[in-house]
């Protein structure tokens, strides 16, 4: 395929059609676990993932074993997870199974854990599963013990190896919360449950594990990328976050926008704290630390000022930026260059007052059209081994003032504009093969698994004789009880045979 055949140039009409096929939806994360998860680390994961809604479905004392003294299977939480239809599910169970009252049924631990994964994987949302290893437990296990005491030796020597095996057999992602904390007893208030600060550490490690096993797309840019400059645009409206929602559960997209930054490797007069992106140490360090698979670059808008623009400097700096990252990262990232949005300033005359800029050195639409866009094309051609696509943000926005761009300054997009950028960039990444070459998760589900069945009933539902149902709160529904429509849980051995219910 010719390189330039990858270039995407979409009209607003084409984009509107594409939008109906790929909708933006906040990613949903269900955190399953026992008291450790109930202590609050899922919330700490959530604040690190602005594109996701992380909801805790923890059940203190919950066991993997169906025969456990406080089994997660009968807690009512599973039905709630099914009602939520998450895109991602993290499972952090196993500690409570170490009790002697439960571990007598250890022969069924692996079977029941796999059945849990099968059950969750059977949801219509087909969630990405993260198996999270149980945290250590420090208890004196000598002498006579209470049958309700968690046992650290059982967790470390028996349960942990089985959890690893289950994750490997099922092909799920894993997050290790055992090894990093095995020598950190002081971080757990009662030698079992984490202190408040420890929950933040647990959340950070779950986040890091998630990112490390995701396809990483890192968006380099300026205030347009960051999502500032327009009233009513929140962090979740910024196009990198919207892009993450479009790409889905296997991806992590970083918003690397830096307000006011440009590409040219020089310091401009009267620029205040703004600078060349290449000299932003924190941003550059993050790029190298995260080792992205794809890097999108949207820089040039702030370069396009009459007193600042130098075509040769822009091209050489852009090439230097790509070379620095491409030649020093392993694996080598792929780049998507973004043509800048138009700016509505023609021949130094603004149709509205500029914000914070002099009348002679504002962002200039003529320079963007006549100089920045062609220069970017030169860069793409000269670095064809690293650049896999050019995403055209110029054409879709050219006649969209007041529709896609906030009219306050003629530069920064509003919410619809950010959504448009996300869709155009999504199409470019798909054209560039964003989903190829990266390990994708395949959860192995046996044809006759032990998965619990969830049934959605109609108002006229009549339960067949011998079928046991639980409602969302986990309570058993009496055989003679009137059945309201909704979602109910039935055990694997039950085989309802009525036309009034459909298995989900």
Image (cartoon, helix red, strand yellow):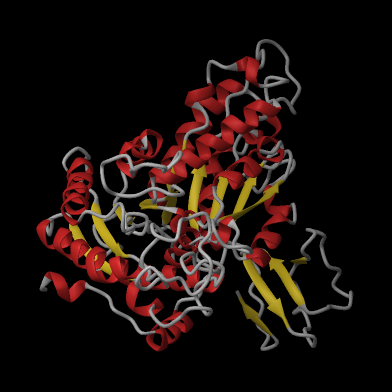
- Residue 204 in picture, x, y percent from top left: 54, 36
Between 444 and 262, the residue placed more toward the observer is: 262
In the picture, measured across the screen, residue 492 lies left or right of residue 128, that is right
Q: Is residue 124 visible?
A: no
The image quadrant of residue 340 is bottom left
- Residue 414 in picture, x, y percent from top left: 54, 69
Q: Which residue is rendered at x = 60% and y = 74% of the image?
A: 504
* Residue at the extreme right of the image, as rendered: 481
- Residue 56 in picture, x, y percent from top left: 68, 49
In the picture, measured across the screen, residue 280 lies left or right of residue 89, that is left
For residue 213, above or below residue 248: above
Q: Which residue is rendered at x = 74% and y = 79% of the image?
A: 464
Between 423 and 146, the residue placed more toward the observer is: 423
- Residue 175 in picture, x, y percent from top left: 47, 39
Q: Which residue is rendered at x = 46% and y = 60% of the image?
A: 244
Give the quadrant of the N terminus.
Answer: bottom left
Between 67 and 240, the residue placed more toward the observer is: 240
The image quadrant of residue 337 is bottom left
């Amino acid at each position: 395929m010719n390189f330039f055949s990858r270039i995407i140039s979409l009209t607003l009409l084409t984009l509107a059609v594409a939008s109906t096929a790929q909708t933006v939806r906040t990613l949903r994360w269900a955190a399953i676990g026992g008291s450790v998860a109930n202590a609050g680390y899922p919330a700490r994961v959530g604040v690190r993932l602005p594109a996701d809604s992380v909801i805790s479905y923890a059940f203190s004392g919950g066991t993997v074993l169906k025969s456990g003294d406080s089994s997660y299977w009968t807690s009512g939480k599973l039905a709630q997870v099914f009602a939520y239809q998450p895109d991602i599910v993290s499972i952090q169970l196993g500690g409570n199974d170490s009790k002697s009252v439960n571990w007598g049924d250890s022969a069924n631990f692996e079977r029941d854990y796999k059945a849990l994964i099968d059950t969750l994987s059977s949801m219509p949302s087909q969630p990405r599963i993260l198996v999270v290893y149980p945290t250590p437990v420090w208890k004196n296990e000598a002498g006579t013990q209470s049958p309700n005491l968690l046992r650290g030796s059982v967790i470390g020597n028996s349960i942990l190896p089985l959890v690893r095996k289950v994750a490997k057999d099922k092909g799920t992602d894993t997050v290790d919360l055992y090894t990093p904390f095995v020598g950190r007893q002081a971080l757990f208030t009662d030698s079992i449950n984490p202190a408040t600060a420890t929950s933040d550490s647990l959340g950070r490690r779950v986040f890091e594990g998630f990112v490390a096993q995701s396809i990483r797309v890192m968006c380099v840019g300026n205030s347009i990328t960051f999502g500032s400059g327009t009233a009513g645009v929140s962090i979740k409206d910024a196009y990198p976050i919207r892009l993450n929602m479009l790409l889905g559960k296997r991806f992590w997209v970083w918003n690397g926008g830096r307000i006011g930054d440009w590409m040219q490797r020089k310091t401009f007069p009267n620029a205040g704290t703004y600078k060349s992106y290449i000299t932003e140490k924190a941003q550059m360090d993050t790029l190298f630390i995260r080792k992205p698979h794809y890097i999108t670059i949207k820089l040039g808008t702030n370069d396009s000022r009459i007193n600042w623009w130098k075509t040769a400097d822009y091209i050489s700096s852009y090439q230097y930026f790509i070379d620095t990252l491409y030649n020093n990262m392993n694996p080598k990232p792929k780049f998507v260059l973004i043509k800048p949005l138009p700016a509505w300033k023609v021949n130094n005359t603004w149709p509205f007052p500029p914000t914070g800029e002099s009348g002679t050195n504002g962002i200039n639409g003529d320079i963007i059209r006549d100089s920045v866009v062609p220069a970017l094309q030169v860069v793409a051609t000269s670095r064809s081994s690293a650049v896999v696509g050019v995403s055209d943000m110029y054409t879709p926005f050219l006649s969209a003032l007041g529709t896609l761009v906030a009219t306050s300054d003629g530069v920064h997009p509003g919410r619809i504009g950010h959504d448009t950028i996300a869709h155009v960039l999504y199409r470019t990444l798909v054209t560039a093969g964003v989903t190829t070459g990266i390990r994708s998760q395949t959860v192995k589900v046996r044809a006759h698994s032990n998965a619990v069945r969830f049934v959605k009933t109609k108002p006229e539902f009549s339960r067949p004789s011998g079928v046991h149902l639980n409602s969302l709160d986990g309570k058993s529904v009496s055989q003679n009880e009137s059945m309201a429509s909704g979602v109910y849980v039935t055990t694997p051995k039950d085989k309802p045979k009525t036309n009034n219910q459909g298995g989900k």
